[in-house]
Amino acid sequence: MPKASELKKGMIVEIDGFPHIVKTLEAKSPSSRGASTLYKVRFNNLKTGQKLDSSFKGEDVLKEADCSRIAVQYSYRDGEIYYFMNMEDFTQYGLGASQIDEQIPYLVEQQEDIIALIVDGNLVAVELPQSVNLEVIDTPPAVTGSSATNRSKTAILSTGLEIQVPEYLAPGETVKVNTATGKFMSRA
């Protein structure tokens, strides 16, 4: 049973009998002495998709949701449904695009290292790895001899994601992208 001060983005807790995933977390330290830190948390209900904003004190205890985490591979997309396959027993799970809209730009077919969150036999959410490798599809050419400073340019990646990359990168190269921030990390 985690305390509010131990919550992290992506954790799943039970609120009013329903599993909720932590989407955003903000700590507010009051200026007066003796006051406790407040944690403002935005949850998403994993069954209905509704948002829930709550505030907790650091010592408040939340109940962890009863869910299992299994390794899956992203298989394919059929219309608005994204399919993931359990790597052990090859069970297929589908998730609607609206449930994973923030994660879609980081999904590549046959991608592994994805954790599925299963509640009552149904896939309710996926957790992506910290970083993914994506190919640069389009980016303007580097301007030579213009400056010695670190400059960046916009690049369109294989999934349609647009990020800022260093000027020296060219189409066809593979880059490592942070899935939490959506920022360029390094060449892959």
Image: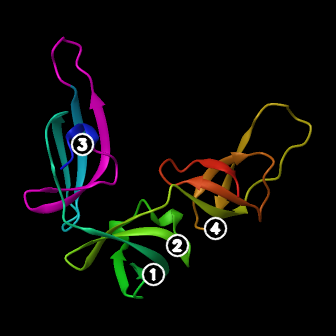
- Mark linked to residue 5: none
Asked if residue 117 is positioned above or below residue 181 in the image, the reply reads below
Please state which amino acid type lies under the numbered disc 3: Val
Badge 4 marks a residue whose secondary structure is loop
Left or right: 187 as drawn, with respect to 55 = right
- Mark linked to residue 158: 4
Circles 4 and 2, Cβ within 8 Å, touching? The answer is no
Image position, residue 28 (x, y; %): 27, 27
Within-10-Å neighbours for mark 3: few <14, some 14–19, many 20+ = many
The numbered mark, 3 or 1, whose residue comes first in the sequence reads 3
Within-10-Å neighbours for mark 1: few <14, some 14–19, many 20+ = few
Find the residue positioned furthest to the left.
16
Q: Name which residue lies at 19% across and 76% down.
A: 120
Badge 3 marks a residue whose secondary structure is strand
Toward which corner of the image does residue 65 lie, by quadrant?
bottom left
* Residue that mark 1 sits on: 87
Kindly report which numbered mark, 4 or 1, lies closer to the viewer in this rendering. Answer: 1
Q: Name which residue lies at 90% across and 42% down.
A: 144
Find the residue positioned furthest to the right.
145
The numbered mark, 4 or 2, whose residue comes first in the sequence reads 2
Q: Is residue 167 magenta?
A: no
Circles 1 and 2, Cβ within 8 Å, touching? The answer is yes
* Residue that mark 3 sits on: 41
Q: CA distance from mark 4 to mark 1?
A: 24 Å
Q: Is residue 26 magenta?
A: yes
* Residue that mark 2 sits on: 112
Left or right: 93 as drawn, with respect to 166 = left
Kindly report which numbered mark, 3 or 4, lies closer to the viewer in this rendering. Answer: 3
Please state which amino acid type lies under the numbered disc 2: Glu
Depth check: give the residue in front, 57 or 179. 57
Please state which amino acid type lies under the numbered disc 1: Met
Q: Name which residue lies at 7% across and 57% down.
A: 16
